Image (tube, coloured by chain):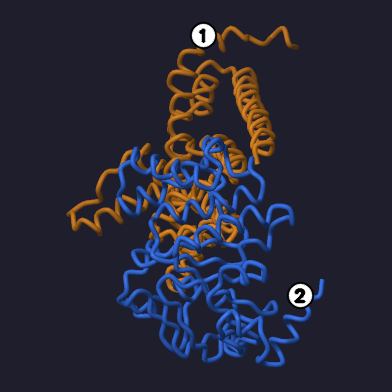
Amino acid sequence: MIEINHVNKWYGPSFQALKDCTTSVAKGEVVVVCGPSGSGKSTLIKCVNALEPIQGGDITLDGVKVNDPRTDLPKLRSRVGMVFQHFELFPHLRIVENLCLAQEKVLGRRHDDAVAKGMKLLDRVGLKDHAKKFPAELSGGQQQRVAIARALAMDPIAMLFDEPTSALDPEMISEVLDVMVDLAREGMTMMVVTHEMGFANKVADRVIFMDRGEIVEDAKKTDFFGQPRSDRAQKFLSKILQH
Amino acid sequence: MIGNFDFDVIRRALPYLFFEGMRFTLTLTALAAFGGLVFGTLIALMRLSGYRLLGRVAGIYVDFMRSLPLVLVIFWFYFLVPYIGQWLTGASRPITVGAFASSLITFIMFEAAYFSEIMRAGIQSISRGQPAAANALGLTYSQTMRYVVLPQAFRNMLPVLLTQTIVLFQDTSLVYVLSITDFLGAASKVAQRDGRLVEMYLFAAVVYFVICSAASFLVRRLQARIAIVR
């Protein structure tokens, strides 16, 4: 589904954000990307739907080359859902309008159909009653669930999560993770940048560990949390699992 | 001394002052603000587009317009446009452009430079995550601008845009250089005709003051309301 081959990316002439990264996410697979801050994990996931351009290598999404200038990027992006660290709901639109905008303008769905679909998904994330509110009236956890519903409204073939719980208060993290666990169990293809090792342990098929722009470890979950692995991953894990 | 004043001259001139003069002033203000906002937004988008050439052209335009006194631009444009029109259309003689059309175009061009800077600040006030989220949903650049970025930028900048429009309302009086009858022009004509300069100019000042301070008050109220909603 997602193929990342020898990807290189620079910010400016001197800082290399991604160094020869190669990995893949198969259909139905859940891959967790972790690593210290500044390791390039967010950058990597943003390259998958070309929110960030790459300078070397190839990324293929469902057979379509992302970094080909002839690729219709809006069309390609509409098929992949993305959830951001800071939710990025559109503050000037009501919740239900947030869910309808792209359905109508990108997929060309009729307004009634878009609303019906949106309400179904809001119901699924437990926020049907908040449809007429504005994003600012919701808590962080609720906003993130809306953001997931908004992405799902496009019937995506895969979902990208960029640190979806990092900006949340601790008591709101689980309500978002619950939605994500359900999604994973339903067979959604997911690439998730997160520090939530509990989530990784529960539903991930593979775990990728990144450090300083490199993919240091790319292993099955059981192997990653088991014994043999690199020093850097070990150190990282011991630090975040300590408490 | 005040006994020598004839305030009745104002009463008699009221229909002329408001139905001719003020109507023109308000029409010109509204059309120039609307046109200035549309072109100003385009200029702002050019400056932020990332295409260096477009950005340069827009930047030079804004700097140029902001470096000239408005009176000069109005005057200059009025006399130049017929010749530019002639050159563009290849006509045999300078084309005739009415004083109203000429002043409207001038104000739109001039205000576009100011509005563009306001809209640019407004667009830059939107976090980069917003267009990223819109793009990630598959919205194109123009859809992202139209449905996500510009509505928010416009809302954030509304008080400043309205304040600039109040300034524009006052600036429209400069059309007197083209002998157009705006509100001040009308007052001035009556003043000259009846020899009542003090009364008429005093009255004009009061009218401008009342309208502008009332508008400023409303803008402040609006600002407070927007601040609560966010």
Is B61 displayed left or right of A41 in the figure?
A: left
Between residues A236 and B187, which one lies in front from this camera angle?
A: A236
Q: Are marks 2 and 1 in contact (CB under 8 Å)?
A: no
Q: Position of residue A201 (x, y in %)?
A: 63, 72
- The C terminus of chain A lies in which quarter of the figure? bottom right
Q: Which mark is residue B85?
A: none
Residue linked to disc 2: A241
Dot 1, how many residues are within 10 Å of its Cα: few (below 14), some (14-19), or many (20+)? few
Q: Nearer the viewer, mark 2 or mark 1?
A: 2
Question: Is A185 positioned to the left or the right of A106 in the image?
Answer: right
Residue B12 circle label: 1
The number of numbered discs placed on residues in the rendered structure image is 2
For chain A, the rendered hue is blue
Q: Is residue A232 placed above or below B153 in the rendered structure?
A: below
Q: Chain of mark 1?
A: B
Say above or below: B17 vs A112.
above
- The amino acid beneath tag 1 is Arg
Residue at the far right in the pictured view: A243
Are the numbered discs 2 and 1 placed on the same chain, yes or no? no
Quadrant where the N terminus of chain A is found in the figure = bottom left
Nearer to me, A207 or A61? A207
Label 2 chain ID: A
Residue B199, image quadrant: top right
**Residue in the image at 33% along x and 41% along y:** A113
* Residue at x 61%, y 40% (from the top left corner): B159
Query: Which amino acid type is marked by label 2?
Result: Leu
Across and down, in percent, residue A45 comes to 52, 74
| Image height of A55 relative to B221, above or below | below
